[in-house]
Amino acid sequence: MRLSNRNKASVYNFIHTLLLMMVIFGITAFLLNEYRFHAVGKVSYGFILLPVMLLVIFHLNGRQIFEYDSDGEALNFKNRNIIPFLDRPLHDEFPKYKLISYEIVKLFSFKRLYITISSKSSGATILKYEISYLSQKEVNDLKLSLNKVVKANKEKND
């Protein structure tokens, strides 16, 4: 099964650009109010704080683009940011039989996928992917596919 939200990259770029523009306009409005008009008073700090907080939340949600491929004998995970220099993209590929378990953690609007795979050197390795920007249907499809792989691996080991 293949799962990707790469087609939404233009939407995420638009949102990011809009938030950056809001920050710039907020700084401009703040400076104009402080040094020229004196119209709003202390409320002018909101011109800067609100857009900056929205931009920080957008980036704290994690990498926007997530791709998953379970076709064939390997599992392929890719997780990257729309702005290439902000974060190093993640790319992991490993055989299906190495998958031990997975867990999806949800906290407010943050969603993380933790994959546990078997490793020769340390016994088990946990890989982390940010899936906050996946829709609920995409998350359910991902769970269904990973459940199949985990179930098949448990049947082979028993």
Image (spheres, helix red, strand yellow):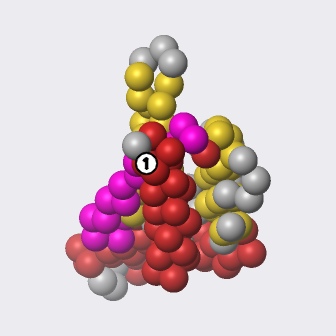
- Closer to us: 137 or 123: 123
CA neighbours of label 1 inside 10 A, class few (<14), some (14 to 19), many (20+) = some
Task: Return the x and y of residue 65 as percentages of the image width and height.
Answer: 64, 62
Magenta stretch: give its range: 97-110
Residue 109 is one of the magenta-drawn residues: yes
- Closer to us: 137 or 8: 137
Which kind of residue does numbered mark 1 sit on? Answer: Lys
* Main SS category, magenta section: strand
Say which residue appears at 27% left-offset and 64% top-offset.
Answer: 107
Task: Return the x and y of residue 104 as percentages of the image width and height.
Answer: 37, 60
Vertically, is 56 above or below 116? below
**Outermost residue, left side:** 42
**118 with respect to 11 (left or right):** left
Task: Return the x and y of residue 144 as percentages of the image width and height.
Answer: 50, 70
Q: Which residue is mark 1?
A: 154
Say which residue appears at 26% left-offset and 78% top-offset.
Answer: 43
The quadrant the N terminus occupies is bottom right
Residue 14 in view (yes/no): no
